[in-house]
Amino acid sequence: MPVFLWAGKNKKGDIQKGEMEASTEGAVLANLKRMKIEPTKIKKKPKDLFENVAFLQPKVKTSDIILFARQFSTMIDAGLPIIQCLDILYSQQENATFKKMLRSIKDDVESGSTLAEALKKFPNEFDDLFVNMIAAGEAGGILDTILRRLHGKNRQVKIQGKRCHDLSHCNPHYRGCCTGCHFGFRYTCI
């Protein structure tokens, strides 16, 4: 769906600007009228020249996935349908790459795929454990609980990853979460 840039005045006469996703310019006009904004300018947003160049797009960070799992869990727990949750998460996402992924996931779920099948299309962001746990949560009717667990798992992995970047913080005798080898010794972060 195309994105339109708009500018207009509210009831107080203040100038407001923004962008809105809609099928036509008329739909944007109708939405602005509903928001009690008198539009002064509506135009289609120009395409980004580097939109399809993957290495120039922002990466999806672990923190984005953690936030996604936490917010999704909260909304599912509150009783919102999956499609509505994905739509809300899409509209709030600032990372353009993750936003495109959420749009694709939402479209797949709307067309009849399970959430797990939709997530499986993005293996760099959602690993097999994540996808399989989502599938189990969908089958068992406990998706909110599974998402909460995934939020905790991903948060723990992110914290461990931060600690393991420097071997000076590692103890060669402690065995636990995050290991690496250096000169034949087994290092684990403490």
Image: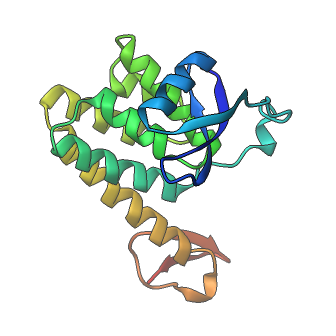
Can see residue 136?
yes
Residue drawn at point x = 32 percent, y = 36 percent: 85
Q: Is residue 83 above or below residue 61?
A: above
Q: Is residue 188 left or right of residue 142?
A: right
Can see residue 127?
no
Quarter of the figure with residue 119: top left
In the image shown, does 154 or 94 lie closer to the viewer?
Answer: 94
Q: Is residue 108 left or right of residue 132?
A: right
Q: Is residue 90 above or below residue 62?
A: above
Quarter of the image with the C terminus is: bottom left
- Where residue 189 appears, as percent x and y from the top left, is 48, 79
Quarter of the figure with residue 55: top right
Residue drawn at point x = 31 percent, y = 60 percent: 152
In the image shown, does 92 or 161 lie closer to the viewer?
Answer: 92
Q: Is residue 190 above or below residue 103?
A: below
- Where residue 54 appears, as percent x and y from the top left, is 77, 37
Coloring scheme used: rainbow
- Where residue 37 appears, as percent x and y from the top left, is 51, 39
